[in-house]
Amino acid sequence: MSTADVVTFLDRLDNERELSHRLMSVPPSTANVIRLANELGYHFTAEEFRAGVLHRNSPADELSDAEIDTMHVAGSAGTEAWKAYLYRTLFAGKS
């Protein structure tokens, strides 16, 4: 229903390793993120998802494609990997 739900969902991803692995087991897409969130009782639109991710991460936290690739490969477990997944989801196909 709101950006607050997005932030709460992201906090849960930070704290629940199994959940982050579940998220990363599906192809990166906003629809897949929203589907998983809905299954867990979180409800937000694609626009709210994007706003929530951007709200939670300051501009200083934005990463280059190379940094995202490094995080995804080197950080296959834990917070860095799912954050790379979300950046891929949000910014796929954007230059």
Image (cartoon, rainbow, N blue to C red):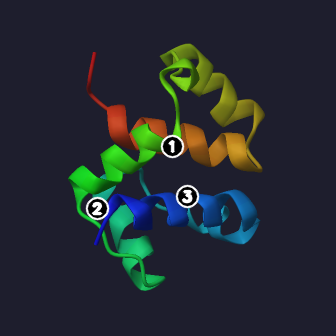
**Residue at which label 3 appears:** 10
Residue 26 is situated, as x and y percent measured from the top left of the image, at 47, 61
Q: Amino acid at mark 1?
A: Arg
Q: Nearer the viewer, mark 2 or mark 3?
A: 3
29 and 46: which is toward the camera: 46
Q: Along the horizontal axis of the image, is 21 left or right of 90?
A: right
Q: Callout 1: helix, strand or loop?
A: helix
Q: Earlier in the sequence, mark 2 or mark 3?
A: 3
Q: Residues within 10 Å of mark 1 (few under 14, many from 20)?
A: some
21 and 49: which is toward the camera: 49
Quadrant occupied by the N terminus: bottom left
Q: Callout 2: helix, strand or loop?
A: helix
C-alpha distance separating marks 2 and 3: 16 Å
29 and 49: which is toward the camera: 49
Q: Earlier in the sequence, mark 2 or mark 1?
A: 2
Q: Amino acid at mark 3?
A: Leu
Q: Amino acid at mark 2?
A: Ala
Labels 3 & 1 near each other (Cβ < 8 A):
yes
**Residue at which label 1 appears:** 56
Q: Earlier in the sequence, mark 3 or mark 1?
A: 3
Residue 35 placement: quadrant: bottom left
Above or below: residue 57 compared with residue 48:
above
**Residue at the location (55% across, 58% down)?**
10
**Residue at which label 2 appears:** 31
12 and 92: which is toward the camera: 12
Above or below: residue 86 compared with residue 5:
above
